[in-house]
Amino acid sequence: MKKIVISDIKGAIFDMDGVLLDSMPMWDHAGEMYLAGQGIQAEPDLEKVLFTMTMMKGAEYMQEHYGLELSAKEIIDGINETVRDFYANKVEPKSGVPELLRFLKRYDIPVTVATSTDRCHVEAALVRTGLMKYVDRIFTCSEVGVGKAASPKIYEMAAEFMGTPASDTFVFEDAYHAAETAQNGGFVVVGLFDESSRDRQGDLIAHCDHYFKSMDDMLCSINSDRSRLVPVLTIAGSDSSGGAGVQADLKTMQANGVFGMSAITALTAQNTTGVTAIMNVIPDVLGAQIDAVFTDIRPKAVKIGMVSVPELIDVIADRLARYNAENVVLDPVMVATSGAKLISDDAVEVMTGKLFPLAKLITPNIPETEALTGISVKSVADMENAARCIYGKYGCAVLVKGGHSINDANDMLFDGENITWFSGKRIDNPNTHGTGCTLSSAIASNLAKEYDVSDSVRMAKQYISGALAAMLDLGSGSGPLNHGFDIRSRYML
Ligand SMILES: Nc1ncnc2c1ncn2[C@@H]1O[C@H](COP(=O)(O)OP(=O)(O)OP(=O)(O)O)[C@@H](O)[C@H]1O
Ligand SMILES: Cc1ncc(COP(=O)(O)O)c(N)n1
């Protein structure tokens, strides 16, 4: 099937169940879930039995078959409560959905939802899953007055609201009958696989213009507008071996779909076994690099890495304040994986005093967290205390990275209000040179693409896990990651 070109989408209409939300299993198991709530194990094919029945007939069947001492109305109310509870408290978005909706928003493409589920459930689920902020309007079949199988009216109303002609409006559906209606109505139909309609994939494919096995597959195959790369600046040291510093940052930015630019703070001679020389740049030259970038291609995010001396920190603080830089992510690099010290003692205080207040997020690892707070970090509670202490002292959100833990690789974000954990499976890879640089650059890239801090960290964490899992093995020490592990192009072959 054809690729989707982003500029072809003028408006998007999403079905909810089975497309945005992983909710079809609930519809297939509502009776079973209700009975489980009553402490009763349902027969194996209860849903098949109920499938052909009306709500009332189904309730009467369950009353008789399971000896329930409840009226049919009470049973129906109970099932409705099971459904309500599922949408309000349990349902999750399908994989790739937040990314796709965010992506459409970035291109100012209006997004509507067209669903046969009742509005109260739709709103509860979309608010709780964080998807509501991407949706411009919800249309429900009961409000429109006709179902999707019978008429394209719901799609027509959504398109009218968005002001887009059917031929430029993309309808995302998992059910073949809805796809058929939308296609007959002149819409561009994107069919998406859902387990609940596995048997009808042939019919779905027959009625769609594009078909994908998952939203993730679709994301990989969308042709974004190559003229709309967002610029991001790294202010960091150069690593001659290419695994950390500016080199890691630029590779990460390329792989995360932004345009990377650099202002170099220091030249280091290093490889996977150690650092053999460091030459800091002259402060004026650092200032000139930042001026050159900001006065011509204003970055949408800035990542700061290795800055060894107070004079360079002063220049960065001065320029970032002058240009009112946005989305600043600061990785307070202190010691290289190979053991070399990358910051002078007097610089730490200047960095915390002058750069921390300009940062949207700082990303210390555990030894850096200890150095910044004086708290010995040995447990989850210590990580939380230290993060609160950093926020209290400097007022910036903090991501304490758990890469130095023994059993896991869980990172913790504190934004002044909430603690959010990003759990990661520890990957058994001794090659971790540049993980901190890579993570902070991926976060900056995501912020530049207008993801919020929490989504930016979540996606950056997925990226770094993939780069570690690719198991690149270069050099005789702790080697670099494969930053390009997910780039698919004929030029990679
Ligand atoms: N072996 C691993 N498996 C999975 N994730 C890891 C592993 N090592 C590090 N990470 C992840 O990599 C990111 C960077 O964490 P880390 O604590 O290594 O930072 P750092 O010490 O600043 O990195 P650097 O090596 O560049 O100094 C975090 O998201 C962390 O959870
Ligand atoms: C120029 C530069 N910047 C940062 C690091 C830290 O990365 P790591 O701790 O993985 O060595 C480094 N080694 N070199």
Image (spheres, helix red, strand yellow):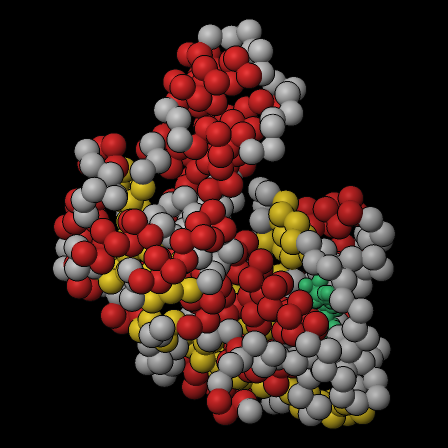
Q: Is residue 22 above or below residue 183?
A: above
Nearest the eye: 356 or 157: 157
Residue at 75% of width from left, 50% of height from top? 383
Residue at 19% of width from left, 33% of height from top? 145
Could you tell me if residue 309 is visible in this image? no
Report which quarter residue 36 is drawn in.
Answer: top right
Q: In the rendered image, which quarter contains the C terminus?
A: bottom right
Q: Is residue 205 above or below residue 472?
A: above
Could you tell me if residue 209 is visible in this image? yes
Residue at 29% of width from left, 54% of height from top? 179
Q: Position of residue 1 (x, y in %)?
A: 36, 73
Q: Position of residue 489 (x, y in %)?
A: 49, 85
Report which quarter residue 45 is drawn in.
Answer: top right
Nearest the eye: 194 or 198: 198
Q: Position of residue 231 (x, y in %)?
A: 42, 77
Report which quarter residue 58 is drawn in.
Answer: top left
Q: How many marks?
A: 0
- Horizontal relation, residue 351 to residue 136: left or right: right
Nearest the eye: 109 or 339: 109
- Horizontal relation, residue 236 to residue 186: left or right: right
